[in-house]
Image: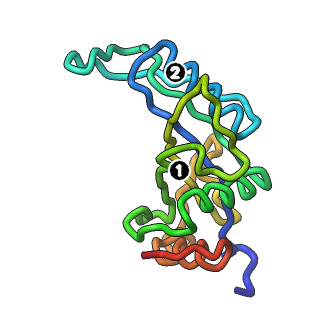
Amino acid sequence: MTNPMRKIRIEKITLNIGVGEAGDKLEKSKKLLESITGTKAVKTKSNKRIPTWNLRPGLEIACKTTLRSKKAEAMLKRLFQAINNELEESKFDNNGNFSFGVPEYINIPEAEYDPGIGIIGLEVAITLERPGFRIKKRIKKVKIGKKHKITKEEAIEFIKNEFKINIK
């Protein structure tokens, strides 16, 4: 690509652990995210009432952390190693973003087993962008042009070339 405005890059990586209840499990999950990433994790609250799951609005049920720039790329390389550098095509959406799960955090390189935490899995969501995407976040939001959006095929090609990932 010769046009620098068409270059795809990673905007952010969001790591999420959904526990479903407040308490000890949630604290362990938060501690795990902080130890893996080196950043502060935040607790997320439920928005809906689901009586069969004992959920009510405002109940803390999960935790997450977001990584950007060079730290995000380094973490993504480690996360890909945890899933053996393979992704399914179904993990990509039509806007070029993708997500996958890591069944056990001990599969991540440089992550050591902590008996106080136990075995916990996590979800990873990756958001891709091109230069110029920040206009959709301004006070007066402007839409991204159709030709400038990232397609599923472009995202797959980017991941194959940048990270040498096998897409099934």
**Which mark sits nearer the N-terminus, 2 or 1?**
2
Q: Is residue 36 left or right of residue 117?
A: right
Q: Is residue 79 left or right of residue 55?
A: right
Q: Quadrant of residue 54?
A: top left
Provide residue 162's location: percent of width, then percent of height. 68, 74
x, y percentage for residue 8?
Answer: 66, 70
Q: Quadrant of residue 127?
A: bottom right
C-beta proximity under 8 Å, tags 2 and 1? no
Residue 106 % position (x, y): 60, 45
x and y, in percent, of residue 37 in the image: 71, 40
- Quadrant holding the C terminus: bottom left
Residue 31 visible, this angle:
yes
Residue lying at 52% horizontally and 74% vertically, measured from the top left: 156
Identify whether 44 is placed above or below 167.
above
Q: Which mark is residue 26?
A: 2
> Disc 2 to disc 1, how far (Cα)?
20 Å
- Is residue 61 rendered to the left or right of residue 51? right
Disc 2 marks a residue whose amino acid type is Leu
Q: Which residue is mark 1?
A: 125
Tag 1 secondary structure: strand
What's the amino acid at mark 1? Answer: Ala
Q: Secondary structure at mark 2?
A: helix
Count how many numbered circles sit on residues in the image: 2
Disc marking residue 83: none
Residue at the (47%, 17%) spot, across then down: 60
Q: Residue furthest left?
A: 52
Front-lying residue, 102 or 7: 102
